[in-house]
Image (cartoon, rainbow, N blue to C red):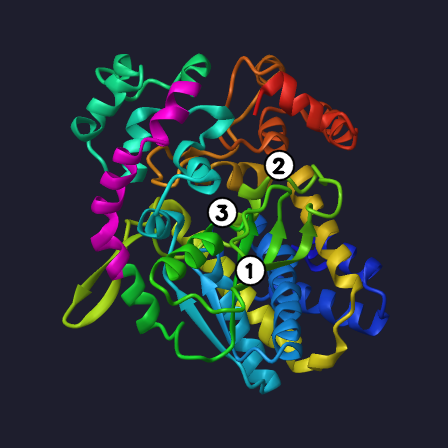
Amino acid sequence: MFDAWGPSRYETIMYGNIREKTMAARLSGISRAIRISHEPRLPGQSAVFDVACGLAGPLVYFYVWWLLRFAMEKGIRRIYFLARDGHIFMKAAHELISVWKLDIEARYLYCSRESLLLPSYENTGDFEHHWITWGYASSISIAEICRRLGLTIEEIRPFLANGGLSSYASCPERPIAREDRPNLNGLLKDESLARLIREKGEPLFETALSYLEQEKLFDGVPYLIADTGWRGTSQYALSALMHKGGRRPPGGLTGNYLGLNRDVHRFGNDSLHAYLFDWRFTPRDYRLYYFICFEMLFSADHGRTFGYQELDGVIVPLLADFPAEQIKSLTAIHHQKVSEYARMAAEGIPFGAFDDSFAEVSRMLSRAFICSPTAEEAEVYGEWPIASEMGEGDFQAMAPPMGFCRFVSCAIGSDRIRGFWPQASLVRGNQSLLCRVYNRFLDLAVLDWYRRWVLRY
C-alpha cells in the first residue's frame, strides 16, 4: 500500500522533463493525487488507474490544451470532436473551456469511416481505391469489399465474371491473391460498377448530409474537426461528402489531430495539423507506431456509428453494440480520470501558460507505455478487443501472449497477427529480454525497408 504512494513511472517522467519546475510538480502531483485517492478497486485495476492518471489524463490534457490554443488564435469558435476517440477529448475540452471561460463551443459528431465513405462516393479515384481495398498486410476479400460498398455478392457477380475474378464468386471470403490485384483494379474502374455504387449510396448520402446540416456544420460559424488522426480518412470523407452536396466551405476543412502518419489523405485545400507527431515532415518514430494503443486509451463508451436514420424529424446515428462488456468498466475509469485531471490542472494553471515541451513529454509518456508495459499493464490491456477492419467483424485480443518461436514467425512474415502490440505480447509471454531487443530494433533506419520487402505491407 505504501509503495503506491510514491511517484509512478509516468509521474517521474513528467516531473523530470517539463521545463518549468513549478508546473512539473503541479502536473505530476495531480496525477499522483488522483491515482492514490481512496476508491474501491477490483483486482487488476491498479494498472488501469496508473495508466488513466499518469498517461491518458496528461496526454489528453496537453493535446486538448494545444487544440484550444490553436482554435483561439485562428478565430475558430467551434470544435467538432469526431466519434469515437473524440468522446474523451470532448469531455476534457468541456472541463477546460468551463474553467478557463473560453468563448468556444465543443460538440460531438457521430461518424465513422463506415458512415461517411460510401455516402461520399462519386467515382473510384486513388482515395476511394484505398478505402475499398485496404486490408491488414495487403489482404482483402470480395465479401469485405461488398460490405464496404453496400453490395451483395449477387450484385457484384457479373462484374467478377467480366473482370476475370469469377473464382471468387463461390468463395467470397477468400483473400484476393496478389496476382489477381490487377484484375481487381480494373474491376473497380468500371463505370457501370461506379454507377451501381452511387445508386446504392444515394439514400445514405442524403441522410448523412442532413445530419451534418442538423449539427450546424453549414451555419457559417468557423470550426475545426478533431480526432486521434493517423491518415485523415474521416476528414477527407467529410470534405468529399460536403463537396458532393455543394456545401463544402470555400476555404476547406481544418483538422487538428493527435498524430498524422506519412501517407495522409487531403481533399483539395483542406489543412491538417498534428500535436504528437506529423510524419509527413519528420521520420517515423516506430516506438509510437502502434496506433491501436492510443485508440484503446481513448475508447468511447459507445459502439461505432454505422449510419444515420430519420426518426420523428431528427437525424439520429445508428450505433453498433459496444464491442465487449468486460472493458466497459475500464473505459469508464479512463473517462472519469481524464476529466478529473483536466479540471484539476486547469484550476491551477492559466490558459496562456502552455509550454512547447509538453509535446516531447507526451511522446516520452507514450513510448513508456507502448514499448515497456509492466506485466500488469500487458495482462490487462493485452486482452483489449480490437478489430482490423472498419466493419469490426473480427475482434480479437490486441496482444495475445507470445513466445520466442511465434515472435520469429511473425517477424519473418509467415504468421500475421492483425493489429498486434508486440511488446505487450512478449511481456505476457515472459520474453522481457526479447522485448528490449525488439525496441532497439525499432530505432534502426532499416525498418521501412523491412516492412516493405519482408512483411510486404
Q: Give SS at disc 2.
A: helix
Image quarter for residue 181? top left
Q: CA distance from mark 1 to mark 3?
A: 47 Å
Q: Which residues are magenta?
A: 182-207
Please state the horizontal and vertical placement of residue 382, each as a whole percent of the image: 52, 36
- Position of the N terminus, as image quadrant, is bottom right
Residue 130 in the image: state x and y as whole percent: 46, 36
What residue appears at the point 64 percent right and 78 percent down from the top-left corner? Answer: 346
Structural crowding at the residue carrying mark 2, measured as other residues with C-alpha within 10 Å and reported as few (<14), some (14–19) or many (≥20): some
Question: Crowding near pointer 3: few (<14 within 10 Å), some, many (20+)?
Answer: few
Residue beneath disc 1:
270
The residue positioned 40% from the left and 36% from the top of the image is 389
Within the magenta stretch, is there residue 165? Answer: no
Above or below: residue 60 compared with residue 388: below
- Identify the mark nearer the N-term, 2 or 1: 1
Report the residue marked by disc 2: 375
Query: Taking 158 as reference, is 20 above or below it?
Result: below
- From the image, state whether disc 1 or disc 3 is nearer to you: 1
Q: Position of residue 54 (x, y in %)?
A: 65, 57
Residue that carries the numbered disc 3 in the rendered image: 43
Looking at the picture, tell me which residue is in the foreground, 412 or 148: 148
Distance from Cα at disc 2 to Cα at disc 3: 14 Å
